[in-house]
Structure formats: structure tokens, C-alpha cells
Image (spheres, rainbow, N blue to C red):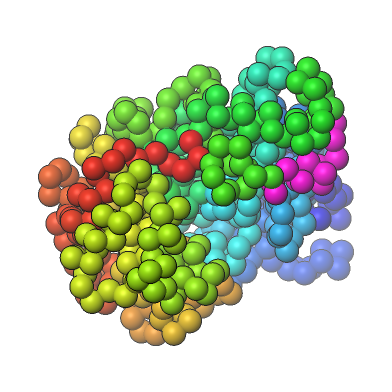
Amino acid sequence: MTGIDRRALVGSGLALAGTALAGPVIGRPVAEPLATTRSGRVRGRIDDGIYTFKGVRYGADTAHRRFQPALAPARWQDVRDALEYGPAAPQKKIDEPTSEDCLFLNIWTPGLRDGARRPVMVYFHGGAHASGSGSSPLYDGTHLCRRGDVVVVTLNHRLNIFGYGYFARFGGPELADSGNVGNLDLILALRWVKANIAEFGGDPSRVMIFGQSGGGGKVVTLMAMPPAAGLFQRAATMSGQQTTVMGPRHATRRARAVLDHFGIPANRIDLLRAMPGARLLEVLDLTDPIEEGEHIIFWSVLDGRSTPRHPFYPTAPLQSRDIPMICGTTHDETRYFLRGDERNFHLSWEELEARLDPEIVADLDVSQVVARYRQLYPDYSPSDIFFAASTAGRSWRGGLIQAEERARIGAPTWMYQLDFPSPAEGGRLRAFHTLDIPLVFDNIERTGSMTGVSPLARRMAEVMSESFIALARNGNPNHRDMPAWPHFTLPERRTMIFDRDLRVVADPRREERELFATAPYLKPGT
């Protein structure tokens, strides 16, 4: 398994050989690049002309520091293989090894120690803070490296109860940060990048963090976390609508529900910390004590310490005012996570309101919402309105608020909306949540992509990946193969529409925005 100590098969002189391309050494294949980190040497490989290091340790095993901030790794003297992905964080329903010893990252780079000072693109995976890893084929950095001469980093960190269970009220000062140790893992990884990325041909002064869905939520949360200040210089979020984090009282109620499930007294948190990790995962199936109809929620907490404020309430964080940012959404977000119930694609008018009501975050009269959509879009079917209104009221709005609040403080922001439709399932998913991932990574042919490989899909991947590369390189997503993409400003709200007809639209879906702006928005579960 990646990250386990392995003795080098050659003497220390191999380290001086740099990329070790001189020929076979004791039966090992050629082309074994070596890199030296602050903790020790690692051995990668060259794949398709790109130096690849997978499963590089950036933090120590967290099993003995459950619910506490992680420590930097201890130094090692041998050469450790970085040939396979490290284990993912403990979670349910994942087809890869998991472990509390999960603080590993992966690097793709065009060169080692060559002084090129390439932009660095650090990706935070999605999964609602509860699942996922940095090893999806869609996150492979090979194509971005080759297209943009950049360094790409993905990583694993603690999730769900291990990364965001808030037990500060049930333990001593050592648990004060428990509600945010998953984000503190990300900060530890960014510190690793700052200290080590020059060895991998990267520029520590041009680090961009980007992420989709829950990963985008982590991006915007770090933009308001003082410990993250100075560790990145650009940011991009794809459908990451975390305008608010979880309040400490709600987080404590969820922690108490965990203790009650196991019959643990409030003064015996030590029993929870010593429990086998596999058993602790049982709680992910609990009903949330606050959010109706949801499994228990764990994510970033307003703890007054590492997270002293909400990311985008009441304003955008001044800490990140000078950081250029892309803020993006997809036109049909909820067609992805509401697709599991086939009935949603065949609703009648009589069924629509009851189905739509629990999917709208804002406290609005759903009958009035339906009536307004029927006025705006008379050709829409009940299912069309279901997906459109749930997207506007649940997913799209949070990203829009982020762009609006940054516009109010003059922060450089560019907003996009992906309208390009997926051909999957006969086209009924349209521009769904996650569709932009393979486009941004230029990975439309990899397993899991649902973009198709048509000339138009290739064009979308080219344009979107080049924009993210341009932001990482120059702090501006504009490039020569697209129309001019202006800043998002108020009241214009100019937005790049990535579609067959690439264009800029002022205030797209204005009527929908105005409809849902009549009620306050909070991220569900906060």
C-alpha cells in the first residue's frame, strides 16, 4: 500500500542521479524519478512523458489523534515508493482501501528541479465532506500538465465524523478544533506544497486551489480561514455553494446524537476516540437531528478558532479580496443528485408541488414558485420545472451569492455557467452537477466522464481547461481561444456561458434569481 516504508534497493548515490534514467538498477525498470521532500525521498514514475508521484505522505497517521489536528510526518531515511494512490479517508461505499492513515497527496509535473517555477493547481475532491478521494480517474493531472505546463496536485484528507465531528463541548482543549480538522488537513497539505513543490518544478508563490461540489465548498471555506492565509494565490469553485458553515450549537447537537447512538456519556468522549473506526462509520446512517429527511451531516463548523466567520456571510472575506477567483455552476445541477428516482423524470402537475417542496432551501410558497415558473417557461413539463426550480433554489443560488458578495468588495471574480448538455441517458441529464469536472481536467475520455467525445465536447474541454490554467498562471482566466470574459460586477452580473455557442450573458436567468432572492439563503444543514 502506498506510503508504507520500503527500503531503497540501491545506495544513496541514486538520489544524486535525479531522475535515475541511466538504466536498470538491481532488476528495477528504467525511468524511476526520485524527488527529495522535507520528510524524505520518494520514488515516482514517468507516465506518458509526465512525472507522476502518487501517495506522497504530507501528514502523520491520524488514528492516534482522532478529532485532533494532524501532525507533519516524521522523517524517513530510505526511499519510499510513490507509485500508487494512498488510502482514502474512512467512509461508506467506496471501491478503494480506506484508513485513518489517509494524509497522502498525488503530483503530476512536466519536470523536476528544473527551475521552471510552474503554476500549481491543487484540487479538493467533492463528496459533501463525507466521501470521495483524490484518486478518481477524472482527476488525473496528466492532460492538464501537458496542455498548460503546470503542476497538478490532488489529495486525501479526513471526512465525515473523522474530519468534521464537533466534540469540543465534550472533551478538553485538545478537541477544540475537532469540527474542522478535515480543513486543517487541507491547510497542512498546502503547507507541504509551499515547502516542497519547487522540487517538483512548481512555483510556491503561484498556487491555485480549486474544487467541485463539497471540494468547492472547502475552497471557499479556506478563503475565510486565517490559518490558510498566504498559502494560495488563486481559487476556483465549481458548484461549491458553501456560503455558510455549520453553527456550533447545531454541530453540538449532531455530536450528541452520535454519543447517544453508542450510549456514551457526555464525559466519556475517550470511549468514542478509542472505538474501532469501522464501527464509528455506523453513525453516517443516522437520521440528522436537525435537517428533515437527511442522513446526519458533518462539515465545517463556526468554531471561533480556525473558522471564526462564515465564508460568505455577512460579506465576502476581506482576507481573500485580492485572490482572483472563478465561480462556476451548471445549468441543471439537480438532475444529477435527484436522478436516482425515476419518477422525477415523469411527474404530473398534481405531483409536482409535493415533490418540489423539500428540494427548495428557501422558505417560499411552493405553489407560487410553480406558478411563476409556468409563466416564465410555458413549454416546460412538470419534471422540467422540478429540476429547474430545485437547481435555482438549492444549488445555483449559493454560487451566485459568492460572486455577488465578492463584487461588492471589488474582488476579482469571473463567473461561469455550464450549459453544454451531456449526451448520457438520452440527454435527459443535460448540464448536470459534476459535468464540468472532466471538461476542466481535459479528461473527457477517462472512466466516469459523461461528456461524450464529440468535437464539441473536445472544444468545451479545451476552452474550460485553458481558462483554469490561465487563472493559475496569470490570475486571469481569459485566453485567446475564447471571447473576452469580463469580471463579474453588479448590477451587470456578466457570466460566461460555456455551451455550443460560447458567449457572455448579463444576469442570466434573472427572473429566477429575483424569485428566490425574496427569501434568505442558508446552505442546507447549517
Q: Is residue 453 above or below residue 253?
A: below
Q: Is residue 281 magenta?
A: yes
The answer to whether one can see residue 207 in this image is no
Q: Which residue occupies 32% across, 67% down?
A: 385
Q: Is residue 464 magenta?
A: no
- Residue 242 in percent (x, y) is at 43, 42
- Residue 375 in percent (x, y) is at 18, 65
Task: Looking at the picture, tell me which residue is in the foreground, 451 or 256.
Answer: 256
Q: Considering the image in quadrants, where does the N terminus appear?
A: bottom right
Image side of residue 514 versus residue 26, left or right? left
Magenta stretch: dominant secondary structure: helix
Q: Which residue occupies 50% across, 40% down?
A: 525
- Residue 168 in percent (x, y) is at 65, 21
Q: Which residues are magenta?
A: 274-285
Q: In this figure, what is the number of numbered marks? A: 0
Image side of residue 85 versus residue 483, left or right? right
Q: Which residue occupies 32% across, 46% down?
A: 364
Q: Which residue occupies 69% across, 33% down?
A: 257
Quadrant of the image occupied by residue 9 = bottom right
The answer to whether one can see residue 359 in this image is yes
Quadrant of the image occupied by residue 523 = top left
Image side of residue 353 versus residue 211, left or right? left
Q: Is residue 175 above or below residue 196?
A: above
Q: Is residue 34 above or below residue 183?
A: below
Task: Looking at the picture, tell me which residue is in the foreground, 324 or 241.
Answer: 241
